[in-house]
Amino acid sequence: MTIMKSACPSRMIENTVLPVSLADIERAATRIAGRVVRTPLTPSPTLSKRAGQPVHLKLETLQPIGAFKLRGAMNAILSRDNAARRRGLVTASTGNHGRAVAYAARELGVPATICMSSLVPANKVEAIRSLGANIRIVGVSQDDAQDEVERLVQTLDLTPIPPFDDVDVVAGQGTIGLELVEDLPDLATVLVPLSGGGLAGGIAVAAKALKPQARIIGISMERGAAMYAAVAAGKPVAVREEETLADSLGGGIGLSNRVTFALCRALLDDVVLLTEDEIAAGIRHAAREEDQVVEGAGAVGMAAILANKVQLLGPTAVIVSGRNIDPAIHRSLIGRSTR
């Protein structure tokens, strides 16, 4: 389902420089070194055979919180001054970003409050609580949770750490792109989960700066794909949040989006949408063929290959973004017959 082509190897839109640069990402890499894991890029023989091209898995599942979000959260928090950190951090999350902020806050000895909607799975809520963060469950969408963040910023003077629409967060996620090019110098394609655009946008900035011909393909779900809808419309739009196996990809991008919409509109070469059955097949493949426990959002790149929804034109990196799936759901999916 092609809705765009890369408009901008020079990272310009209508003569305006994009909000995140390669230099921002390189500074982030220095800042977070030693505080996050430099994750491996491992070959997948089964997916390589299926695709007819070398396919490698970037295992962000090996981060201490089980997801890539630690990169952006850590970079953003370290970029704030000491006074801002001491006032306390606050964020809205569909689960993994909140876990990242809570983990980083604990490591740095500062308080954190995580606002989430009732759609966030219970296992993710409990994981955040175990890290010592304050938790607020508000409403039925990421937008409702973000409204609570804004209220707490105004009333308690807490320091916000946005889940994606922030230069420092995007730069932190973009460090994955630096590692991809270093580990796979002939990189041709990246399959990256697409939600608010922090991960896809950051990787695209780094990868296209270093490998201008590399294709960056965002993968999302059919149910409530907000960035897909925004790029198709040419502007941020409201999208109803729905339950999905790829729960970490849920939520809107914000009608006043300042950073990630511009990056995704300029730098993504394509966006692919998956059904729930296709996402489930990706989760099963990860467990049975790759020996990896992967949540729905982390499985979408593998799922897109299995569903023949992407055409790979050379060595490919698949971003396996997280492992934090409810164990009961995972067991039920793995045990389900594919016939």
Image: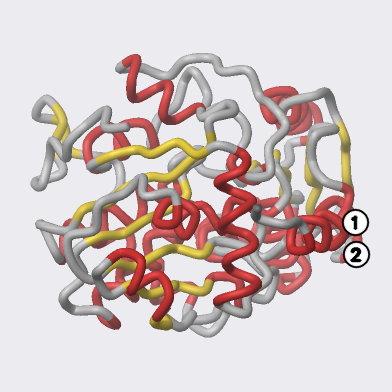
Residue 158 placement: quadrant: top right
> Would you name the residue on which mark 2 appears?
130
Q: Residue at x 40, y 70 (%)?
A: 47
Amino acid found under the numbered disc labelled 1: Glu
Residue 74 placement: quadrant: bottom right
- Horizontally, residue 267 falls left or right of residue 139, namely left
**Nearer to us: label 1 or label 2:** 1
Q: Residue at x 29, y 67 (%)?
A: 316
Amino acid found under the numbered disc labelled 2: Ser
Residue 53 placement: quadrant: bottom left
Indicate the position of residue 254 as horizontal and vertical percent values.
53, 24
- Compared to residue 226, the image places residue 304 above or below, namely below
- Compared to residue 235, the image places residue 69 above or below, namely below
> Would you name the residue on which mark 1 appears?
126
Callout 1 crowding tier (Cα within 10 Å): few <14, some 14–19, many ≥20: few
- Horizontally, residue 112 falls left or right of residue 101, namely right
- Are the residues tagged 1 and 2 within 8 Å (C-beta)? yes
Numbered label tally:
2
- Compared to residue 123, the image places residue 4 above or below, namely above
Between 184 and 290, the one nearer to me in the picture: 290
Indicate the position of residue 126 as horizontal and vertical percent values.
90, 56
Callout 2 crowding tier (Cα within 10 Å): few <14, some 14–19, many ≥20: few
- Label 2: which secondary element: helix
Disc assigned to residue 101: none
- Label 1: which secondary element: helix
